[in-house]
Amino acid sequence: MTDLWRDERLRSVFAACVTLGVAVGVFAVSFGVSSVAAGASVAQTCALSLLVFTGASQVSAVSVIASGGSGSSAFGGAAVLAARNAVYGLAMAPHMKGRLPIRLLAAQLTIDESTAMAAAQDDEQHRRAAFWITGVSVYVFWNLGTLIGALVGSSIDPERYGLDAAFPAAFVAVLFPLLKGRRAALAATIGAVVCAALIPFTPVGVPILCAAAGILVGVPREARA
Amino acid sequence: MTWGLVLALTATAYAFKVLGLVLVGDRTLPPLLDRCLSLIPAALIAALVVLNTFADGRHLQIDARAAGVGAAVLAAWRKAPLIVVIVVGAAVTALVRAA
């Protein structure tokens, strides 16, 4: 571990992963606020972050409840949004060494951020390190932020500080290093276009799932795409 | 919000997470599948940027967030550190919204 710590690149990976965790924590405050505002108790709000731990699904469920939707419609949207974690699991599976208990733990941390940070690394060791560091730091800060937001309640307005843009901004930063090859750039373009095209016409969550069509760029063997 | 909904969401979210990681395990995948799976983060994260920037429920709209994320793109393109990209994105959004 000390050898690893002398690895300068690992230190910079560590810094980036923890930074992302903090940014997500700030977003979690706004989740906590809106969850309590939607009528969930502080305990329920914290349970969502501790147990469900997939931000987009939690936000979606809470916003459906807030707008007067039924429990089943809140569940449906959140479930569709959570489905992309299965796709992330597939992407991470070849890189995760270890036995079942390790995989079961890794599964809980398989989310947008950990998968993205892992994908941005170019060797296996840093990829695994980025996955675990990001997963743990996001878990800690997401839950801390949720608790703070739930306790503070509606005394702050996240939109006033532009916190709703902190999330896409963080994803932009994470996306850039992924666009190294032409294939990845094309896959990202297709993903973005498909998502934008479907937002007005499909239920919440479906556009993101359909954006996975971008991976078909990987089908041809030659790097012509 | 009911505890039943909290538990149903917990079970569903974890089931999806486990599906990919445990189903495939550390088996070596065929090259075709491997090439496609490695493109998942790029495709989905690009979609997440679009969703979080332009979507308001099921409507597409251009508002203060677009300015903030545009500034974040510029910062990321200039290779600014992650935290700078995030702060720029949030700050520009807040400023445009206040204006």
Image (cartoon, coloured by chain):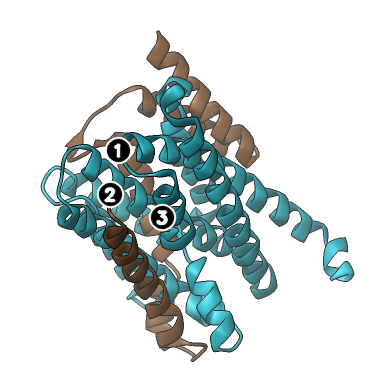
Q: Is residue A31 visible?
A: yes
**Dot label at residue A48:** 3
> Which element is circle 1 on?
loop
- The chain identifier of the residue carrying mark 2 reads B
Q: Looking at the colours in the rendered structure, which chain would you say is drawn in cyan?
A: A
- Front residue (pair B31, B64): B64
Q: Quadrant of residue B22?
A: bottom left
Does residue A198 appear left or right of residue A100 in this picture?
A: left
- Front residue (pair B52, B18): B18
* Residue at 44% from the left image edge and 44% from the top image edge: A42
Determine the CA span between mark 1 and mark 2: 8 Å
**Farthest residue, direction left:** A201
Vertical position of residue A90 compared to residue A77: above or below: below
Residue identified by numbered label 1: A38
For disc 2, the neighbor class at 10 Å (few under 14, some 14 to 19, many from 20) is many
Q: Colour of chain B?
A: brown
- Do callouts 1 and 2 mark residues in contact (Cβ within 8 Å)? yes
Q: Is residue A218 visible?
A: no
Mark with earlier residue (1, 3) = 1
Vertical position of residue A190 compared to residue A129: above or below: above
Vertical position of residue B88 compared to residue A121: above or below: above
Give the amino acid at mark 3: Leu
x, y percent for residue A110: 48, 66
Residue identified by numbered label 2: B1
Q: Quadrant of residue B87?
A: top right
- Front residue (pair A61, A100): A61
